[in-house]
Image: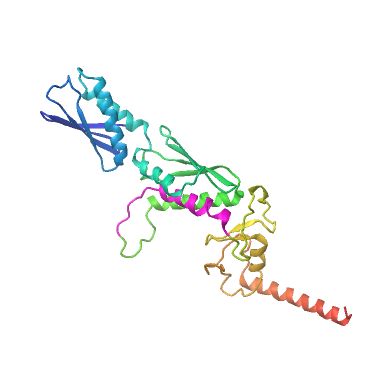
Amino acid sequence: MIQVFHSCFIDFTYYVIRKTDHKQLRLLIMFPESYPANPIIVEVKSKFIPPRAMTVIEKTCEVEAKKLQGQFQVIPICKVVRQFLEENMFINCAEELDNIKKRFFEKGDEIKIRQKSGVFILKVHKNSYFMNLKMAITDSYPLEQVRITVGETNFPKDLAEMFVRQSIEIARRCVVPPAIPSKGAPPFEPQASILPVSEYLVSKCIKLYPVMNCSICDKQAFPQDSKDVTQNIRDPKYVEYVYCSHIFHHKCLDSYMRTPPFKDGKKCPICQKQIFHEKWKESAEVLEQRWAHKQAKQRELAEVMDFMDL
């Protein structure tokens, strides 16, 4: 619901038009001496709406006021502004959307904005890899996090799902205070989540992984042609992601995880963080036993071959 509050004076009046705490503005309306023969002058002020959006509102009011010369103009102009707030869901995050294009986009990337429904679509690519992302907000934004879903993509399914899980967590941290605040940290304040989520998805996922190397063999993890990407999770060239954000060929990671040392867990060769993965959950003790058994079999086979002089 749009709320309007006003105060009147001889030469001017101002209205506070409010949809939510973060979608409100003050409309200062000044009357020329010859009003209503001449149009009113409108100035917009807001702590939450970007300057560019306020300029658009002022120019819209100027055009409408000129159409109403000779008539009462205040109420129609207030209605125009109310309608503008109602129909432009992204009015208080216009700068975030601009920054997505300026900071993260390359030629061929697209953003499609549906103002009335509060939805925008990102179509992002890197070489032959692409992902379409749907993001949506409510009137409560930025107090409520942006919602993210994946559309069409040629990234492996589980990797695309991981992108979204991580981005949802980033968005959550923007609006939900930590369970245990850091010592000496300032009081938590909700932050806008569109830009940090987009930075992660575009710059740190879609633009990065197609050109990233396997952390073991140091060869490009993904094939140059996206048509050659395997979706078979047991394929040697299947791309595995671990929680430190590095990627591996399945064969490379499998061999690494099953080769000593096992004490204190296996570490990522790049960042030295411990590797956690659903496919490799065995304890160090189990891995040691399997390795010892494998080595014993190899020694036995070598002895047999030596005995038979093969």
Front residue (pair 240, 279): 240
Give coordinates of residue 28: x percent, y percent: 19, 33
Q: Is residue 309 visible?
A: yes
Give coordinates of residue 37: x percent, y percent: 17, 19
Give coordinates of residue 141: x percent, y percent: 37, 42
Query: Is residue 41 a member of the stretch shown in magenta?
Result: no
In the image as oriented, which residue stretches furthest toward the front?
107
Q: Residue at x 25, y 27 (%)?
A: 62
Relative placement, left or right, of 248 versus 71 is right
Q: Quadrant of the C terminus?
A: bottom right
Magenta segment, which residues? 186-212
In the image as oriented, which residue stretches furthest toward the left?
10
* Tally of marks: 0
Whether 304 is drawn above or below 133: the answer is below
Relative placement, left or right, of 135 versus 295 is left
Query: Is residue 206 a member of the stretch shown in magenta?
Result: yes
In the image as oriented, which residue stretches furthest toward the right?
308
Query: In the figure, residue 61 lies in which quadrant?
Result: top left
Whether 157 is drawn above or below 273: the answer is above
Give coordinates of residue 188: x percent, y percent: 32, 55
Relative placement, left or right, of 79 versus 272 is left
Q: Residue at x 21, y 19 (%)?
A: 69
Q: Is residue 19 visible?
A: no
Q: Quadrant of the N terminus?
A: top left
Front residue (pair 194, 57): 57
Chosen colour scheme: rainbow
Q: Residue at x 22, y 22 (%)?
A: 73
In the image as oriented, which residue stretches furthest toward the top?
70
